[in-house]
Structures are given as structure tokens and as C-alpha cells.
Amino acid sequence: MRRFVSSLFISLTFLTSCAPVPSLWGQYATPTPQFMVPVNTEASDSPPPQASTPSPHPTSSFTPTVTAIHQDAGTPPASAGTSTELVLTEAGLTPTFDVPAVLYYAQSGDSVAAVASRFGIDTSEVHAEIPLSEVGFVPPGTLLIMPDRLADPTTPESQLIPDSELVFSGTAVDFDVQAYIRTAGGRLSTHREYLGSTGWNTGVDEIKRLAFENSINPRLLLALLEYESRWVRADPVDAVHRDYPMGYINLYYKGLFGQMLWAVNQLSVGYYGWRAGTLTELQFPDGTRLRLNPHLNAGTVAVQYLFSRQHNQSQWAQMIDPGNGFLAVYTGMFGDPWARADKVDPLFPPGLAQPALLLPFEPDTAWSYTGGPHGAWEHDGSLAAVDFAPFTDHGGCDLTPTWITAVAPGTIVRSERGIVIQDLDGDGFEQTGWALVYLHVASTGRVTAGTYVQLDDRIGHASCEGGQATGTHLHFARKYNGEWVAADGPLPFVLSGWVAKEGSLPYEGTLVKGDEVITADPVGQLKSVIIRRLDDE
């Protein structure tokens, strides 16, 4: 490979990866009118009807209930037996600790490292009735026994929404966003807004776009919007929420799309931070902190985290109250989220593995690894994406003759505005099974939606289309059942045998194959050059 590279005449100045900016699609929300000019088109004498049951809002103040972790915490699944003592005896688990033990039944998406972090212990202190690996997910329902080292109070143990109701999973496949918004009849149904990247958009356009691009469940977005401002079923609760529907007062995020984009970012930080074990506590605006209960699921943590960003603990506690807070609004709008989740869970089934994937370009063609693991869509959330750039003798955003190629067989289910989504399970939905995201694909030569591609078929040319970029490149990521899959996580991103490894910061990192190492570099220095070999097939 080195001999091949040394014969190339390549420009190293303008190769790049996705810039770490608020949105891959450009400046959505900004006070400057050339990017976004919100316009109110509702007739002033015909306000939307009021909702028959107004959303509860945090108006009273009380001390939040906290739940400490006890030895008998957690409820075993039905298949695990009827008594904890019986399960322990049959499993033969006899770990001894210098503190009381705590029992925990693994949830879908749990890894040993993340669970240990949430409980504040070392991975070596996590015991189970089956052998545990620090690579991969722990099978859902697995009984884990650990020392109870958490001394501080924690958030309540009540779970609000399942993970499948937060990510854009199979529970949303049959949800008609347009029909729901129209029937609800609130301000959202008549809203129009100008965005620099796509021009005029309706409220329906914006909710659908946020859901698809960020892989966030549209039901959750609508419920949050209704809870915070009553935009969905009525008129905004006050003048402030007319311009700032989520109550986040910041000119950069003024308007519906900007506000929801901000909310999506907070949800992503909470959800994927819990998944990775990097988020273990909430910090409120007044600086106070509260440890997250380790028995929570990622979807619940995401909602709790969002509400903690601008509310004190007393308001926050009311908002997460299962009977009178956000969940009451959610179920009033969409019914029981756990009943829907039962049809698609677990999001990560036991034994899940990544299918064989090749590098996304043709053999014997030099590319550069310009971005290690970084944000899948926005710069926050799961570090699920990696970047590759084709070599050029002049750099910039011009097209090159090199091709992006299909890394596996599958159906193209979406091809628009610089993005191509490939479904690998054959059902035609990107919300289910494995889905691959190719971003910054030029419109010229881009594969069309509905096409079934074989391994190595051409997807299109790398470009700067589809968002902010300082140079032509491909942004590449994976989803499973609607959830972004971290590049260096329990299911590592493996392309032609190259394994993605995180760096100390997003966009840094390496690709490793045996004793070979490729180092990510935004300007395409020699250390970042990667060539797909024929024997990688």
C-alpha cells in the first residue's frame, strides 16, 4: 500500500470532514433574515381552537422524590423466575462485596462498561449468571449483581417512555404525522417558516424533517411541543412561547425549527450519553446536581435531561411525575407507549452483530480517512459517523470522478438533498433493522430511491451537498432499529476489516486492522490514506 501511495500526486490542503457545526444541513436557526425568516400566516381573526384538556405545566413547587438503590431494587422479568433467591441459587452466583449487593436486570442496549459507570463501580465488579464480555451488549433480562456503592440520592426510578418511543423506530412506521397535526388543529397545523436550506416549510415539513434526519420519534417531538407550549392542539400558551415554543430563550434558536432542533440535541445528549455510560447525573440551571437512578432506561434519561436544562429541581420533579407531568400529556395524545414498544422491543436483540461491510469506495482507489467517530447528524449525541474524502489535485467542493459504492446489498429507501439511506433487511423502512447513511452525495449521478443495489454498485459522488462542509467528502453512519450505533461502541464499525477507534475528541481517532493503523486527519496527510484492497472482499 505504501508503494502505491508514494506514486500518487495528491493535494493535502483542502481535504476535510464534516465541520463541527450546529447542523449538517446548515444554519437552520439564526437571527439573520437571510437564513431564516419565520412568517405567521394564520388569519388574525381565526385563532386555532383551544384544546379541550390543557396540558399540565409546572406551576407548583415541592421537593422532588428521590430513590436510593436497595439490595432488592428492580423487578425481574417474568421469564427470570418468581423469586430473587431462587434465581440466585440456580445461577450459583455467590459474589461477596464489602457493601450490600444490588440486583439489576439488563435492559436492551446495556453494555458492561455503561452499567458499571451508572452504578459507580468497576467493570470487574459486575457479575452475572452467564459469562460477560466487555465487547457487545449484555442480553436483555440478564441478572447482574453488583456492589451498592451509590451513597447519594438519585432521581426517581420510574421509567417514562421506552427507548423505541424516543428513537425513530418501528413504532413510528405507521404514524401519519400530517394527519395527526391537521386533526389536532393547533398553531402547528397552519405554521409556515422560511429556512435557508429548504425555503418555505410547513409545521408538518419541519417535524418530519427533524424526525428523519435526527432519527427521533415524531410522536415524542409533538408531545414535547404540546407540553411546553400547546402548539399542537391549541394556540401558544403565551407570547414568549409563540417565538420560543420550547421555552429556550436564545436568538440563535428562535422559531419552531430552531427550538425543536435545540430540543433534539438535548435529547440526543441524554439518550446516547446514558447508552455510553458518560452521563450519570443531571445538573440544573442553579448548579445543583442529582445522580441519575441506574435502573432507568435511555429514553427516560433523555427526557429527564431535556427538562433539567432550564428548570429547577422542583419544576423538573413535577414534569417527570408519571401521573401529572409530561407522561400524562403523552399518553393523552398517543396512548400507552409501552404497549407499542412491546411490538418492537428489544431494540437490540440478543446476539446482534454488524453484517459484513466493505469500505464505501472502489478497490485500488486512494481515499483519505478525514474524520474519526463523531456526531451521526448533529454534533451532539452518538459518535456514530466517520468521514472519507477522495483525493483531488485542487481541493474544495468540486466533484471528483471517484465513486462512493454500496458496502452491502440492500434497497435505497431515501435519496434526497445530499443523503442516501440504504435499508439492509429488505422491508423498505429505515426505522427497522440495519440502515446505512451516506451523506454529502452529489445530485449528479446519485442513485435513486427504490433501487436495489448489490455490493459495490455505485451510490454517487462525494460532494459538499447536504450541509456545511469545507471540502468534498462522504459522511457515513449506521442505524439499527432507528438508533444510531456508536462507531467505537459495543458494536464497533468494521469496514473491510478496519475497526473504528475513537480519539480523545470527536473527529479524531483511527482505523485499525491487525498491526496497521490509519489516523484520521482533516487535510488528508499521508497517515490518513486508505486504499481498499481486492483481498478485503
Image (cartoon, rainbow, N blue to C red):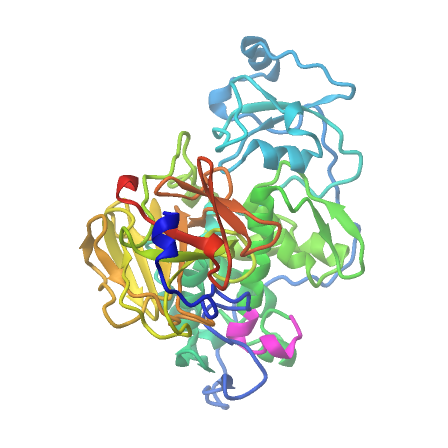
User: Residue 218 versus residue 265: which sits nearer the camera?
Assistant: 265
Q: In screen coordinates, is 322 left or right of 172?
A: right
Q: Is residue 324 visible?
A: no
Q: Quadrant of residue 259?
A: bottom right
Q: Relative to 326, is 463 above or below?
A: below
Quadrant where the image shows the C terminus: top left
**Percent x, y for residue 521?**
51, 58
Q: Quadrant of residue 146?
A: top right
> Does residue 82 belong to the magenta stretch?
no
Image point 60% across, 34% down: which residue?
113
Q: In screen coordinates, is 151 left or right of 3?
A: right
Bounds of the magenta span? 248-259
**Percent x, y for residue 348?**
43, 38
Q: In screen coordinates, is 485 left or right of 442?
A: right
Q: Is residue 453 visible?
A: yes
**Percent x, y for residue 382?**
52, 51
Q: In screen coordinates, is 116 left or right of 38?
A: right
User: Residue 112 versus residue 457: which sits nearer the camera?
Assistant: 457
> Does residue 257 belong to the magenta stretch?
yes
Image point 37% across, 64% down: which residue?
9
**Percent x, y for residue 394?**
39, 74
